[in-house]
Amino acid sequence: MDASEQPPADNLYVTDPDTDFEPVDELTEAAAREQAATLREALRYHDHRYYVLADPVIGDRTYDALFSRLETLEAAFELDTETSPTRRVGGVPLSELETVDHVAPMRSLDQSGEASDAREFDRRVHEALDGDEISYLCEPKFDGLSLEVVYEDGVYQRAATRGDGQQGDDVTEQVRTIPSVPQQLRGEFPDVLAVRGEVYMPREGFQQHNRERVERGEDPFANPRNAAAGTLRQLDPSVVAERPLSVFFFSVLESTVELETHSELYDRFPEWGLRVTDEAEVVADIDEALAYRDDLLDRREELNYEIDGTVLTVDDRNACDRLGSTARAPRWAFAYKFPARSEQTTVRDIVVQVGRTGRLTPVALLDPVEVGGVTVSRASLHNPAEIDRLGLDVGDVVAIERAGDVIPDVTAVIDSEHAGQYSFPEVCPACETTIERDGPMAFCPAGLGCPAQREQAIQYYATREAMDIEGLGEEGVAQLVDSGLVDDLADLYQLTAADLTGLEGWGETSAENLVSELGRTREPPLADFLTALGVPEVGTTTARELATHFETFAAVRAASEEELQTVPDVGPKVATAIREFFETEENIAVIDRLLDHIDPQPVETTGGDELDGLTFVFTGSLDTCTRSEAQELVERNGGAATSSVSGNTDYLIVGSNPGQRKRDNAAEHNVATLSEDELVALLDQHGIAID
């Protein structure tokens, strides 16, 4: 038995514990404190045996009795601690999920379902490593929700979803309730440890949870991944605690312990109390890696969790450092996907959905069919060209696959009683505007003049990445549109509290809060306004680049395609999309009405040269402002804000929960590191204040 698996010495509640406890009111505070500490130690050991080793040494009833006793002691003598097992029952509901920076990038993986692509990955690896012999760590590719978990001095500090890879949602309190996530590490753990894992809902737990939802009259989750993702984003941790979530850990993001191979984690993690899969295996070459994948595919249905492929990782970490990473994915790992599951059913109807940007997507309505344990009753047909390729019509028997094991697709017509195929409409089903084609795609060109696009545009306008209007979600927008109170974006700013309280579900407080939120957005930053308009091809990054370059909305709106292409990351396709958006008659009318109510604020400039020649890199979270706002402030004043430390970097700004790698690179390149207070002082020396 490994040392970390040894039971706590002289603990009364480990082996055959006596659960006939003396009355609480007969205990002194000192005795209660000692008993609570002994119970916490024992419960952590039992949690480790059950959730990590899958080898419990006591029964469920005995565990429940120990747990209940600890709850009673903590309540009676106010002995609760952050790392107590009782914290898993959930805490105070949150008002929203905050966004936090990751300690290190959580990158995606290059992936394919073709063996030839996996062999090409192997060829590139060997070529980059000058033919060195390498071995691969092979692991299941879990179909769940990726997670960052941070420990300091062995104590659980925080958890965050992957998000965009740089930032994610803070789900610390939700993850605290998951039994397979230890609140206190075991053994000889590192001082700082940030790990990556996958949250999932076991198949058995998923089926039971869906049964309970149906019995309560609620819609079942479509699949375990959706169930896990939806659960983790619950604002009430006690709801999360009631659902059967679990976690597998599989990589280190930051640590004060150096590891020579990735496979060492499968020894170290269990020693520290972190759960790992027992399906990982180190193989000698790509042929063995492909054989591992095929074997796992054959055994896929035997597992109690969903997987959609295997991950091949160069095991030697020094070799991985030599291979490096792109901005999106490491060059030393590859996901070899499984083929999608396929079943057959009948197409009962085809409807055409109108997207926010005007794209028309045909959707097949199907006789319900189970595909990989999920009941599917609709499937995307993507575009008119896909219907042409399939030769599809209503009434056809078709093959259904879950692409990526999530999104259902029609992949082939198996049996058709019709000579022809479905005729794609020539006009938009929402506004009857003549449809335009762009290659295989079909679009409604009416823009904000189309009711379907308009409603979705209002929904997007209110989202966090746009104007961030709290209290105005998808259901609220639909209610406002259906009631006739809102027809386009400008109508939002004419709403009164009295208008809203006349609708079902709206009280005086919620109505006044929404009107206040709308008032807050009457002078939005230009970048936020450009994002909120939903211009095709313009996301938050491009909107920021446009705002910085042109400074005012009038300048962006009037810019020619040639002028637009002088902006970083704006090529001919994006420039054409922007111009067409601002030249569409219906869009012009809506934007003009909107500008009667709001005033997009020009990008602030201060002369632009206070920080000229200085390059900053940020790591960790800041208190005085967000990291993004600090980067914008630096750039507004002539400096450069980059994502990685190099010999050209002047300052590394270190906030809370910083990444170790950037600090190591700063030391290597002799780059000055500043705390947040020192950054504020430096900016003050240049006459720059953080708002």
Image (tube, helix red, strand yellow):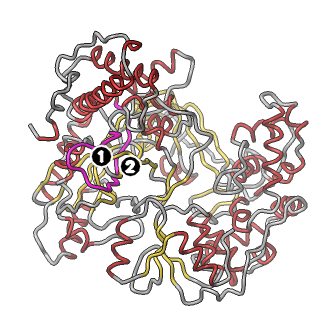
Residue 577 occupies quadrant: bottom right
Q: Residues within 10 Å of mark 2 (few under 14, many from 20)?
A: many
Q: Confirm whether residue 372 shows in the render.
A: no
Q: Amino acid at mark 1?
A: Phe
To which residue does mark 1 refer?
249
Lower sequence index among marks 1 and 2: 2
In the picture, measured across the screen, residue 110 lies left or right of residue 3, that is right
Q: Is residue 234 above or below residue 190?
A: above
Which element type, helix, strand or loop, lies under badge 2?
A: strand
In the picture, measured across the screen, residue 1 lies left or right of residue 71, that is left
Per the model, the C-alpha gap separating discs 1 and 2 is 9 Å
Q: Residues within 10 Å of mark 1 (few under 14, many from 20)?
A: many
Residue 495 drawn in magenta: no
Residue 109 occupies quadrant: bottom left
Q: Are marks 1 and 2 in contact (CB under 8 Å)?
A: yes
Front-most of residues 72 and 309: 72
To which residue does mark 2 refer?
149
Front-most of residues 401 and 10: 10
What residue is at 79 percent from the left and 54 percent from the top?
Answer: 520
State the quadrant of the C terminus: bottom right
State the quadrant of the N terminus: top left
Tell me the magenta residue range.
182-202
